[in-house]
Image: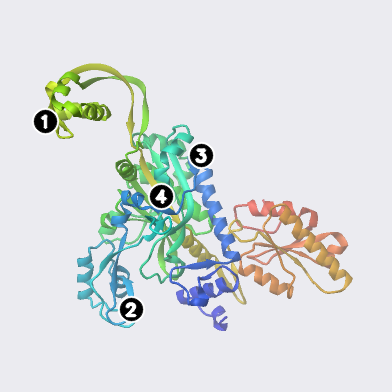
Amino acid sequence: MRSGWFSMELKSRDIYEILSDLAKRRGLFWPSYEIYGGVAGLYDFGPVGVLIKRNIIEEWLYWLVYSTGLVVEIETPIITPRIVLKASGHEDHFTDPITECTKCGRVFRADHVVEEQTGITVEGYSMSDIWKVMIENNVRCPECGGQLTKPQPALLLFKTEIGPYKGAPGYIRPEAAQGMFVSFKNVFTVVRNKLPLGIAQVGKVGRNEISPRQSLIRLREFTIMEFEFFFDPEKSYEEVMKYMDEELEEEELFVLTADEKSRGIDRASRYRTLELIEEKIVKNPWMALWMAKGNRFLREIGIPGDKIRFEEKLPWERAHYSEQTFDQQVYTRKFGWIEVAGYSYRTTYDLDRHIEFSRSDLSVFKRYKKPVEKLVRRAIPNPIKIRELAKDKMGKIMENISSMDQEALYQELMSKGYIEIDGVKLGREAFIIKEEKVKIHGEKFVPHVVEPSFGLERIFYALLEHALSLEKDRIVLKINPRIAPYQVAVFPLVAGSKPEHRKIVDIARSLYRALLKARIRAFYDEEGSIGRRYARADEIGIPFALTVDYQTLEDETITIRYRDTREQIRISIHEAYDKLLELLNYKGKFKLNFDKYP
């Protein structure tokens, strides 16, 4: 570790270097396949990193899935048949602009190179418009300064085959969403046909990024936490207000709207959740509710509220399926504002496309409070006339007619004067036209969808950066105790060969095993001085440490130490479990003065 780091004012480069060094030394993360030179965009997570990631997932599931009563969780495959991503539009739209250096042969994302060298954001620009900006600003290869080629679209899907040899074409899913859309009807049936309904999923996805160069921020394989929220758009406001408690209504969010962006404003304004709805900043009230919950989730795990903002995407920046999108961003010292989540109003796009491509009925039935009378016009086939016109095609034509929507059949017949089936024109004389009043008890409709989607690795990085603290002679990861890899460390003060030393070690090990049995995430260490062990625990964010010492042998008390202040007090060893639960469940600032502790 560089000696000057603790005395100098931290810069973005320094915080990143310190974090990267810590990550590798303490088992958080490191580049994958490092002994073979590594692969850009792929990272391993070590023993400490996987625990932190899992705890973030558990918190996300709590705040956005299980505590709401509106969302259920499923799991679908990462291998996806081609037809699914053709229907979703990803095969046609999931591309990025690439440019190649004519001198060194390296390939880059054209929009990123342009922004890095000129400060001009060209996201959503056409290939020719990006090329124009590159020429006007003499954008060159960032590695060797060579000439770059005209940008071309590159498909970001990882291709595969389902089955050996000449298998069916498929892709690694680029998002978890499509598995939830195609499973919608099954889940809807399981929950007894109730809307609103959220279907959540946590899992790996793959995107063949062009030139990932930002550590955990841009990966080729990463974990996504997202859900599709299905609802009746005609009932959005009344249903949202059922779940909008006072605390959620008053949740403060920093929002930069598309209108403000288009006017050159780059500073987010403060809004309450209810204001986003009442001022129609969001196109559907459900967007505001989930944005508020997502804001609270990030604050609860340790991201400061003033470092979180929502940026609305301009029309040409949005994905092909989105009517409105807000990126939830966190400010980092290394990368500036980074997107950690996206909230998209997908309307009926995905279900409509899967209905079209699969010919499955993904609509739902909405029952009216009271039946309504409706004048229904029908064109009933006249078998005698149809036989005269269709002859040997009679059976096939009658089968086609029976599968058609009767109202649509009537409208086509009235507007054109005939319908054509299998090359046979059937005029009005082939049908008996009837009008009758019927009682309608409900109607079918395709639900609308709002999607909150979170990138786990980006949240992981942002959380670590905000938790990293340098204090004189030590690094401390001041991470939320619920997110910390271990909840408590257990140390014997000494670990020598003397009888009293062995007793101290035996008690410490017994305490450690008892905590594990009680499902407390405990860490045990007896190597080196107690000061070094405290420092190692601080570096990976363990909030509390229990130390067995000589006094323990006399009165069965131990010390409990708090990571952030180094404060220590003595408690009975028999109270350790209850005291830890009290400390870990307390949501305010941790204080170890038990006389003042609430």
Residue type indicated by callout 4? Ala
Q: CA distance from mark 4 to mark 1?
A: 41 Å
Q: Residue sitting at 42 percent across and 69 percent down?
A: 335
Which residue in the protein does label 4 denote? Answer: 177
Query: Which amino acid, mark 3?
Result: Gly
Mark 3 vs mark 1: give the one in front. 1
- Numbered disc in front, either 1 or 2: 1
- As helix, strand or loop, the secondary structure at mark 1 comes to helix
| Above or below, comparing residue 287 to residue 589 in the picture | above
Residue 416 is tagged as 1
Q: Nearer the viewer, mark 2 or mark 4?
A: 4
Label 2 amino acid?
Pro
Disc 2 residue crowd, few under 14, some 14–19, many 20+, Cα 10 Å: some
The residue at which mark 3 appears reads as 69
Mark 3 crowd level (few <14, some 14–19, many ≥20, 10 Å Cα): few
**Mark 3 vs mark 2: which is more N-terminal?**
3
Q: Residue at x 82, y 62 (%)?
A: 507
Contact between marks 1 and 2 (CB within 8 A): the answer is no
